[in-house]
Image (cartoon, rainbow, N blue to C red):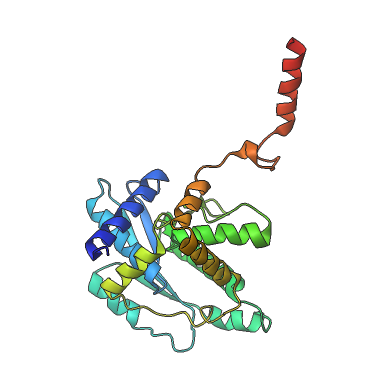
C-alpha cells in the first residue's frame, strides 16, 4: 500500500514529465486553470501551484470557475476555498444549464452541447483575463477512454492531446495531468479533503458510452494488469506507415520509390 507521500510524488513526477515532454509552460505565461469543483481540477491546481514554486521560470495562475446555474449549486464553496488558498480567481456566471436542458432532446445525453457552450465561455474568459494558456484537468484515463470512444464509435484514431491551439489560434490549451493515473488522483483528492462539487447535469446519465468504455478498461485491467500503461505508450509510439491514412502517409510515393528501384536493376 502506497503512502500519501508516495502518491503525491507520483502525481508531481507525472505532471512534471507532461510539462517537460510537451513543452507546456514558458517563462511569463499567464495560465487560466479551469476549476470545476471535481477531484481532477483541484489536483491540477495544486500541481501547478507546486511547480509555480519550484520551477526555474515565472508564470502566473488564475483559477476560473463557470457557474452554469445548475439547481442547488453551492456558490460559496469555491470562493471560500480559493480565498483560503490565496489564489487569484474569477467566478463566471452564465446560465448554460437552462440552454442545455431546453435544447437537448429527451433521452439524449447533454455532454456535447454542454461542452461546446462551456468551452466557448471559457475561451472568452481567458482572453478577458489576459491569459495566453488555458489548463484543463483531463488525466491519463480520460485520454485512453477518448481514444477508444473515437475508435469504436466515431471511426477515427484520435484522442485528447496534451497540448493544442484553439480554432482561432490565439490560445494554447494544456492538459497537465495527461500522464497522471485517475486512481492516484482519487487517493490524493480524498487525502486533501477537497470540497468536491458533484455535477448533477451529466453525472447522472447512466447511458453514456464513456461509462461503458471505462468499465471495459477496468475489466481489462483486472484480467491483464497495467494494460492502461501499455495503451498510453501506444499513443506515444505511432507508425503512420503502418496505418491506412493517406493524408498522413503518401503511399503513392512509396510506389514511385519501388518503381525507381526496379528500374535500376
Q: Is residue 186 above or below residue 245?
A: below
As drawn, is 205 to the left or to the right of 15?
right
When asked about the image quadrant of residue 196, the answer is bottom left
Is residue 148 or residue 226 the one in the foreground? 226
Closer-to-camera residue (144/56): 144
The residue sitting at 52% across, 47% down in the picture is 234
Residue visible at 52% across and 56% down in the picture: 160
Quadrant in the picture for residue 110: bottom right
Q: Residue furthest top?
A: 265
Q: Position of residue 221 (x, y in %)?
A: 47, 61
**Place of residue 215 in the rendered image (x, y in percent of width and height, measured from the top left):** 53, 69
Give how far across and how far down residue 59 sits, in percent.
31, 53
Query: Which residue is painted at 38% across and 65% down in the image?
Result: 183
Which quadrant is the C terminus positioned in? top right
Residue in the foreground of this view, choosing between 60 and 225: 225
Closest to the observer, 56 or 253: 253
Q: Is residue 124 visible?
A: no
Amino acid at each position: 500500500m502506497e503512502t500519501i507521500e508516495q502518491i503525491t510524488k507520483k502525481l508531481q513526477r507525472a505532471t512534471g514529465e507532461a510539462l517537460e515532454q510537451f513543452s507546456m509552460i514558458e517563462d511569463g505565461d499567464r495560465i487560466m486553470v479551469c476549476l470545476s469543483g471535481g477531484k481532477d481540477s483541484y489536483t491540477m491546481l495544486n500541481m501547478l501551484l507546486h511547480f509555480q514554486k519550484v520551477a526555474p521560470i515565472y508564470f502566473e495562475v488564475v483559477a476560473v470557475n463557470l457557474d452554469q446555474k445548475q439547481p442547488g449549486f453551492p456558490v460559496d464553496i469555491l470562493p471560500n476555498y480559493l480565498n483560503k488558498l490565496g489564489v487569484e480567481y474569477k467566478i463566471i456566471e452564465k446560465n448554460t444549464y437552462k440552454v442545455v436542458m431546453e435544447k437537448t432532446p429527451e433521452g439524449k445525453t447533454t455532454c456535447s452541447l454542454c461542452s461546446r457552450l462551456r468551452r466557448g465561455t471559457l475561451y472568452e474568459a481567458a482572453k478577458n483575463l489576459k491569459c495566453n494558456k488555458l489548463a484543463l484537468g483531463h488525466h491519463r484515463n480520460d485520454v485512453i477512454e477518448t481514444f477508444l470512444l473515437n475508435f469504436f464509435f466515431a471511426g477515427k484514431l484520435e484522442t485528447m492531446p496534451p497540448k493544442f491551439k484553439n480554432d482561432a489560434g490565439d490560445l494554447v490549451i494544456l492538459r497537465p495531468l495527461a500522464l497522471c493515473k485517475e486512481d492516484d488522483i482519487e487517493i490524493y483528492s480524498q487525502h486533501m479533503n477537497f470540497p468536491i462539487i458533484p455535477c448533477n447535469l451529466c453525472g447522472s446519465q447512466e447511458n453514456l458510452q464513456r461509462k461503458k468504455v471505462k468499465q471495459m478498461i477496468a475489466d481489462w485491467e483486472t484480467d491483464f494488469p497495467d494494460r492502461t500503461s501499455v495503451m498510453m505508450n501506444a499513443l506515444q509510439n505511432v507508425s503512420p506507415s503502418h496505418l491506412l491514412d493517406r493524408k498522413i502517409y503518401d503511399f503513392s510515393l512509396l510506389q514511385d520509390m519501388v518503381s525507381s528501384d526496379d528500374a535500376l536493376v
